[in-house]
Image (spheres, coloured by chain):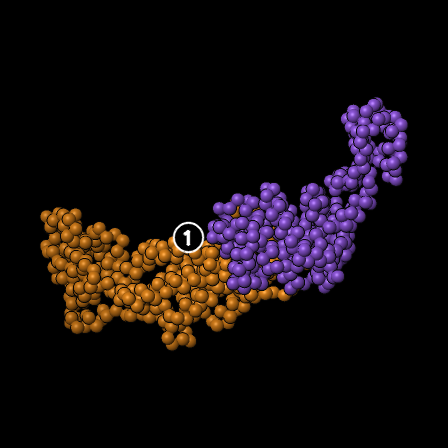
Chain colours: A purple, B orange
Amino acid sequence: MTPAVELLEVRKSYGGYVAVDGLSFSILPAHIFGLLGPNGAGKTSTIRMMIGITSPDSGSVQLFGEPLRRRALRRVGYLPEERGLYRRMTVGANLVFLGQLAGLSVATSKQRIDAWTKRLDIEDWVDRRVEELSKGMQQKIQFIAALLHDPDLIVMDEPFAGLDPVNTMQLKDVLVGLRAAGKSILFSTHRMDQVEKLCDSICLINRGKAVLQGSLSEVKNSNGRRFVQIDYEGDGGCLAGNPLIDSLNDYGNHAELRLKPGADSQELLQSAMRQLRVLRFQVMDPSLEQIFIERIAGKDD
Amino acid sequence: MTDFSIRKVWIIAKREYLERVRTRSFLLSTFVTPVLMGTFLILPTLISTSTARGILQDSERPARVVIASDNRALAELASGELTRQHGTRYQPSVVSPASPAEREQLDKKLDDSDIEGYVWLDASAIASRHVVFTTRRMGDFILQGRLGDALSYAFAEQQMVKQGSSAIDVAATLQRVDLKAVRAGSTSATYNEIRGAVVVFILMFVMLFSLLSYGVMVMRSVMEEKSSRITEVLMCAASAPELMSGKILGTGSVGLTQIGVWLGMAGFGASRSLYLRTAMTALDVGPSLIVYFVVFYMLGYLLYSAIFAGVGAIFNSIDEAQQWNFVVILPLIAASAMILPVATDSDSLLSVSASLFPFCSPILMFERLAVHDPPRWQVALSLLLLVAAIGATMFVSARIYRTGILMYGKRPTIRELSRWLLHA
């Protein structure tokens, strides 16, 4: 399967500042890809190169198996983080304009606007001016604008920022539906909880470099099942000296801990049972957030 | 990456055009400006020039002037000459002898507006030929000039008759010379002072005003898109050069529409009103002048809108841009300061070089074309320089625009700007 987009050793600097440093990844059809990283990590710079707004200093960007050309951008839908609409124009006029720019006829645009606004429950707002709409409402319009021309690659920078839970669910369902229809979706965020539920694979970047990448299960496995929660009775002080434990949060009769790399959780259970009455012992999947904080914060020390 | 889609430029220009044409400010400026301009510019000019040509002869009340003198013959000669030269335009009458009592009465008539003024020709005035005209119409230089001419004529005639010439000889001797300037090498184009003055002022004003307001409109529009963050949404669908040219063309078409409406209004007015038609004929506005105007307007607009688009991309708010705006419009201010010197001496070195300088030529070369026939090569050269300057400006602006529209927050330094320029 040809990836919808493929970055190879892409590098971009502004003046003396390196925004993206040797980044490589690709996104397959019917996949949701999460581009993660703290603020200023280089997410937006990476996205801008993917869709030809800027070009990389070195490395290559391929769209649909070919070097990037403007024509290929017709198959890309983009929802930038910094987004807006013409405030004095109506919702419908905004969407028709953006649809036309994306290559649609006025009639097709109108047809699709009709369908999308019905699907997202905003059909009553089509003839209103954008300035009358709430922020969240505008965001739904922009979401539609990015999808109007039925793109094969959908790039969304913080698509859920500022949305209430109901609208977030609605848009999430749309994205899942698009994945089922074979579209490639990249979405960029620093909100880990959203990624965890939605993404097939991720790339975590920090200071322009990939810190961690792969499918979600790969990423979790490679970071080991190293998180353990214990409910116990007895003197928890013995845990503090245990050589298997890397870090510990002891609450008296509940402890959350992280094992040292390579340490076996079964061994810890045995040693704990010798000294304590163990009521519950659970090995946890690390959350992406934990991995994120561990990786990024660890680098900063 | 270099493909440039005319279709996208068209879509962008169309949106820009329709949005601007529908605004209240466009309607207002399109329909109120001619009215204001008519009131402040055309009417006074028309009245004074048409006074000169006698266009308004029938509609205007004749000016009543009294010539008071002890020398009745002299006063009657002057009064007769005024009537002979200007027909019913003036209604002179003679009071003789000129006694202090008469003068009091004349002052009272002036107060009651029964007369427009009187000439007091007492013995000392006749001897010294320093004559006083007492009037409420201090600004009517034409009346004063003609009265002076008529009096001079009367003095001369009386003198000659005294020396024994016949009345016919006197008339022949004193016949005025009618001088008309014809440009070297041209048979038709007579230099027309009236046309020069009026056309220069109306069209210069329209061009300056329009270049400025539509240039600034491009700038504001770029800033609006930048601050509303729509640029980034558009950038995936259209390239920076497409966006910039669409914006410039769309806004420019609004300007052309406005000027078209104005020309149409003038044409319609001329077809419906005898008064306006006479005035237009007097102004001698031919189709070639309109063509020159449109060509120079369009080129001037392209030049200035390209600069303004770049300025709009650099700054985040109108306030920030204000001081730089001044730098941009400086050549326009210089050009407007040159309007008068160019009108009076259209072929001087200063006039020629200013009319070749691309940032002034839309106004000044057009002015020279309106006032005179400048040599063909100068017109061609100014067009060439203008087009070259447009090319260079567009190139520089497009590069600044491309980077600038995605930069929010901090205003760039000159060094950063030059990096935007050089950066491929």
Kindly indicate the quadrant of the structure image that contains residue A162: top right
Please indicate whether residue B234 sits to the left or right of residue B93 in the image. Answer: right
Q: Which chain does tag 1 point to? A: B
Which quarter of the image is occupied by the C terminus of chain B? Answer: bottom right
Secondary element under disc 1, as helix, strand or loop, is: helix
Looking at the picture, tell me which residue is in the foreground, A214 or A293.
A214
**In which quadrant will I find the N terminus of chain B?**
bottom right
The residue lying at 49 percent from left, 52 percent from top is A126
Figure check: A234 above or below B91? above
> Which x, y percent locates residue A55?
69, 57
Depth order, front residue of B158/B249: B249
Seen in the picture, residue B271 relative to A122 is either above or below; the reply is below
Answer with the quarter of the image where residue A257 lies. top right
Q: Is residue B297 above or below residue B169?
A: above
**Residue A2 picture location, percent across and down:** 74, 61
Question: Which residue does the image show at 38% across and 62% down from the upper left?
Answer: B262
